[in-house]
Amino acid sequence: MRNATPALGEASEKQLVTKLIVKYEDEELAIENVQLTIDKKLNEHTLARLKGRVKQDNFDQFVLTTNAETNLVIEYQVGEDKILLFNGVIVKIESEAEGIEQNAIYYLEIEALSYTYLLDIQHKKRSFQDVNMTYYHLIKTVIKEYPRSDCLDYATEKETLNSIVMQYQETDWQFIKRMASRFYAPIIANHTSDSPKFTVGVRPESTATKLENLNYKVVKNVDTFRNNVHNYRIHSTESDYMFYEVTTKGNDTKSLEIGDSVLYKGRTFYIVSAQAMVKHHILSHTYTLSASNGFFTPPIFNETIAGLTIQGTVIKVSRNLLKVRLDIDPEQSAEKAYWLKYSTFYSTWYCMPEVGDRVNVHFPTKDESDAIVINSIKHASSGSFKRSNDGNSTAAAGSSGGGSSQAGLSIPNAQTPTAQKKQNFDFENLSQNEKVKMIVTPSGKMIILDDNSSSVSIVCNDSTYIRLADSGDISIFTESDITFESKADINFSAEEMIYMKAKESIAFECGESLLELTPEEVKIKGTDIKLNK
């Protein structure tokens, strides 16, 4: 806080020459009959409004040369001393000419904002996933693209993010304000710097300035008191929400700022808003005084996040957790990415995405820490699983589902036992057929539900699969052994025929008895052989 100064009251007895100096781009603007107000509020840019009369030459030059980056500096001179009241960027000009030609009177109205306004122009989309990043580092990361920007942090106390943080369709100013509100703290714009500077929270208390013999107005905000006490459980009384508005006039060379402490009516108050005004060359300040709870800022949420779904690419998997590089981020370190929980809409179906899979990250509420991964998505450029025609499989990350309406190859109809042949399951063609649904692993295992051929296929690879058709046919195909093993019975039953075919031999064995069929002979072995009985 500021050091103690003499009591601020009415204008001093000694009258000094005063002058308001207005500069734009380091050139003084010759303006007369000036009226000036500078509004300083929590969580807002400082706003300066200036109105005055100028000569035609100055009028034309100012209007023609002003652009989106024109700087405005306002100083108040008292004798030999100068007070810098404002340094900012012009955002609006209104000009008016009264009268005709040489007799015309020219008026200018100028609005300017503190340089923090530069943080409040472009809406951005990005994520911050490093849970060990401090909020101070987060804010410094956000403002580093603005030359000579800076921030003083009196609120976050080296707290870390501990979860994913999203900046979505927010300006940097809106985003920083939301982050500060997590600590119930405001941000306060610096209105005398020529670059974006601000504080998060309020400076630590120091010696208070004494105010006395001033006109005042009292406002008691009972509604805000009730809202904060019941919704945020803060410890406060109704008197904490009693605000005094006091005005100082005269050659006040010690302008007070938001956050400064003052002594008034025997109590310590803090300035929560201020307005500087110059009228008829006299500078005055109107301060709003409050107890320390007057700085309390309820948490701010980005409502556009609720219900949002953003696509991304899986970069790491662990059990039911995923790390994802979101599409809104140009890059994302796997080491610093946030672990997102994988969730589905089903209680009995669960299939984890793989590294490289394209996924949807869903934000069900306005609190981005509730984010979850809800499903994988098929994408042409995602490096999805591909099966080669030679029966071998390659995988580049992906489980995938049905695709477009383009016609693709369907699974062939079931073959008769005497005409069984190897089938080829072409993933790319099948995935383009809207009547085919698939579950696929990166190594090539598939379950294929095909409405074209009215069949279900379970595929280990092109050489081993089981196929069930609506016609009732069941086909088992493999180039390796098939083994049926049971500790109880195995029953084969058919109303018409059981058909078995082998190129080398068919053998039945029970204990010491044997029946073996080969292309050359039939062998029967047993202790008691009965024929035609």
Image: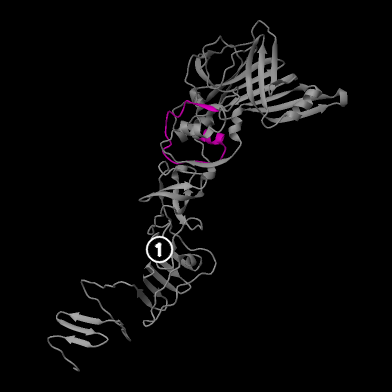
Magenta region includes residue 171: yes
Name which residue lies at 59% across and 13% down: 254
Q: Quadrant of residue 418?
A: bottom left
Above or below, 338 relative to 196: below
Name which residue lies at 66% across and 20% down: 74
Magenta region includes residue 412: no
Mark yes or no: residue 330 visible. yes
The amino acid type, in three-letter code, at marker 1 is Ser
Q: Secondary structure at mark 1?
A: strand
Query: How far across and down, in percent of the image, does residue 494 sit?
Result: 31, 83
What is the magenta range?
149-178
Query: How far across and down, in percent of the image, does residue 179 sit?
Result: 49, 34
Query: How far across and down, in percent of the image, does residue 506 sit?
Result: 25, 82
Query: Mark 1 sits on what residue?
Result: 393
Residue farthest toward the left in the current orientation of the protein: 527
Name which residue lies at 81% across and 27% down: 97
Query: How far across and down, in percent of the image, does residue 99 sit?
Result: 85, 26
